[in-house]
Amino acid sequence: MSGNLFLACHHEAPVAVDLPIGQVVVVSRRGPAKKVNQDGALVLELNGVLVLAVADGMGGHADGEQASRLALASLSSSIAQALEAGDELRTGILDGFEAAHDAVESIGTGAGTTLAVASIDHGTARAIHAGDPSVLLTGQRGSLKFQTVDHSPTGYAVQAGMMEEREALEHAERHVVLSALGHAGLRIDVGSEHDIAARDTLVLASDGLTDNLTTAEIIEIARKGPLLEAAERLVEFAEARMAGLDDRAVPAHLTSNREYGGTPD
């Protein structure tokens, strides 16, 4: 199979796509305080490579939704064109970022969108992103193999060791984004390639998840059990945090004190 396997902005319940490389699960749910869902997800398989993407639109309800859809469609088209021309996948993805930036800018209302892309090609994974969607790779036993750094004041502060991750979740500037498609000063970070093992889990998420759960909490849930169930638990935990529930009121199976990165896989 080749082409767009999944391109959607609205999926309240997790949806699974089974592929030769493994299973992909997508869930895109409107936040409790939002009238529309401005997030979008892409699953693209072409010429034996897999590309996953998450976009989070901004700039008003309708404009934000349009921006995320345009970005994902532009990305998909650029990757397909590059691979058909015999170009490298990385080239197609970067061309996709440029095309998506131009498409979102052409809306003309100040709309924008963040975008994170993860590619899997011949046993290696690479993340390319702009803004604050997160990409992380974890092993089955909980090691953090790589994680992107949010283009945000809190993201840079956590990376520099100036702020604890838990503190960043409650910071007044946690929603400030310093890079977005359609806006001036766009920054695109291209990650290095990392080996991906058979039982590793790759997580792409918008700030609806990462502004509410720590990396350790995401890993502890994502690495265990069927992916469909793990995705639902992640959404349930994030929504509990959004609702302002004290952690003592969050179901016990969703919480963990485990720290990440200490166990080799």
Image (cartoon, helix red, strand yellow):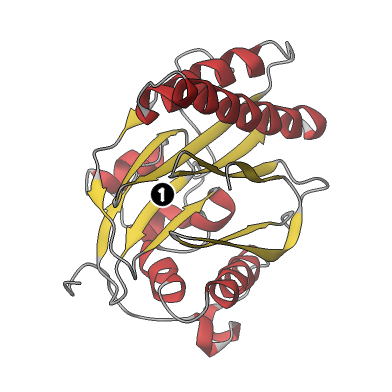
Residue 141, compared with residue 99, is above or below; it is below
Residue farthest toward the bottom in the current orientation of the protein:
252
Quarter of the view holding residue 258: bottom left
Provide the residue designation for mark 1: 135
Residue 1, compared with residue 182, is above or below; it is below
The picture places residue 32, in percent across and down from the top left corner, at 75, 59
- Residue in view at x 29 percent, y 37 percent: 191
Regarding mark 1 in the picture, which secondary structure is present there? strand
The picture places residue 163, in percent across and down from the top left corner, at 30, 51
Quarter of the view holding residue 33: bottom right
The picture places residue 122, in percent across and down from the top left corner, at 30, 47
The picture places residue 154, in percent across and down from the top left corner, at 39, 43
- Residue in view at x 66 percent, y 33 percent: 68
- Residue in view at x 24 percent, y 49 percent: 194
Amino acid type for the residue under numbered disc 1: Val
Q: Is residue 216 left or right of residue 93?
A: left
Closest to the observer: 88 or 101? Answer: 88
Closest to the observer: 93 or 86? Answer: 86
> Which quadrant does the C terminus fall into?
bottom left
Residue 231, compared with residue 91, is above or below; it is below
